[in-house]
Image (cartoon, rainbow, N blue to C red):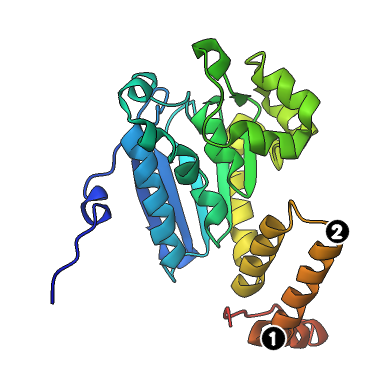
């Protein structure tokens, strides 16, 4: 039999600008951007981040994934020089790589402080939850380079805040402070800088208390119905509900409710 080789087999041999920490006891995995002081995300790093999200999605010991960074800034964006050196084919895959948190079936939390620009903002927008500190600043500054966001930033932002605010942010390279991001509905929670880790830990623990099967179902349903009509969304919701109706976790949840105890979900 002929051996099959794939570039991905060696792509994760040495992580470029980030690390991965798995805490099996807490069912948590952290992807930590680590190229201080600004945690610039390289072209190669984008490919690796996608593969890591895919690998963690298959890891049964992981329930929740946290995307965070070392230092005072989440990420000031991508490697500008890398855009000129990359082939058009490579550049066309950027949005697919950065959408990896959205495709991941598990809950993904972005913990943002300081600069969160360009691809740093875009990959955060692809996460399910964004906890920001009051020092956080979101921006899509590509207009200053004669470009537009290329990894889903303008599209995802428009879905969240509408065309008027998105034009204001994108076409003027305008920065959004943490509190304003919360007020606009971009951030899930805004906390003092010193409390970012505590708030992230609390959300991880909360999410781990739910049924993993119900969590995966809810995420997929919400993602799949974001662009659908109301009637289709309701129809898909009904099918998803009926599927969960026969799950062990639903039976456990109902029994725990009536017995006034904490449910012990197994994910089946």
Using a 10 Å C-alpha cutoff, classify the residue at mark 1 as few (fewer than 14 neighbours), some (14 to 19) or many (20 or more): some
Vertical side of 48 occupied by 154: above or below? above
User: From the viewer's perspective, is 33 left or right of 257?
Assistant: left
Q: Residue at x 25, y 48 (%)?
A: 11
- In which quarter of the view is residue 222 placed? bottom right
Front residue of 34/233: it is 233
Question: Which numbered disc, 2 or 1, marks the residue that appears first in the sequence?
Answer: 2
Q: Which mark is residue 252?
A: 1
Residue 160: x and y in percent read 74, 38
- Between 223 and 267, the one lying in front of the other is 223
Which label belongs to residue 230?
2
Q: Is residue 200 visible?
A: yes
Residue 191, percent from left and from top: 68, 35
Q: CA distance from mark 2 to mark 1?
A: 31 Å
Mark 1 lies on a secondary structure that is: helix
Residue visible at 24% across and 52% down in the picture:
7
């Amino acid at each position: 039999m002929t051996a099959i080789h794939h570039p991905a087999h060696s792509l994760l041999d040495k992580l470029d600008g980030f690390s991965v920490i798995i805490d099996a006891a807490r069912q948590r995995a952290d992807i930590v951007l680590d190229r201080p002081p600004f945690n610039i995300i390289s072209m190669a790093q984008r490919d690796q981040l996608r593969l890591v999200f895919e690998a963690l999605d298959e890891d049964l010991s992981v329930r929740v994934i946290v995307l965070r960074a070392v230092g005072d800034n989440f990420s000031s964006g991508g490697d500008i020089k890398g855009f000129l050196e990359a082939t058009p084919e490579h550049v066309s895959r950027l949005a697919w790589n950065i959408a990896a948190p959205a495709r991941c079936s598990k809950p993904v939390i972005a913990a943002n402080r300081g600069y969160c620009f360009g691809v740093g903002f875009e990959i955060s927008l692809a996460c399910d939850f964004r906890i920001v500190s009051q020092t956080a600043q979101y921006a899509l500054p590509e207009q200053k380079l004669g470009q537009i966001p290329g990894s889903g930033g303008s599209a995802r932002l428009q879905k969240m805040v509408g065309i008027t605010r998105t034009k204001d942010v994108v076409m003027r390279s305008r920065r959004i402070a943490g509190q304003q991001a919360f007020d606009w509905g971009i951030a899930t929670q805004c906390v003092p800088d010193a409390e970012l880790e505590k708030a992230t830990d609390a959300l991880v623990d909360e999410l781990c208390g739910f049924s993993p099967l119900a969590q995966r179902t809810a995420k997929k349903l919400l993602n799949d119905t974001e662009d659908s009509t109301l009637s289709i969304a309701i129809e898909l919701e009904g099918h998803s509900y009926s599927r969960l109706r026969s799950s062990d976790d639903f039976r456990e949840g109902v029994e725990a409710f009536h017995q006034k105890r904490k449910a012990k979900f197994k994910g089946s």
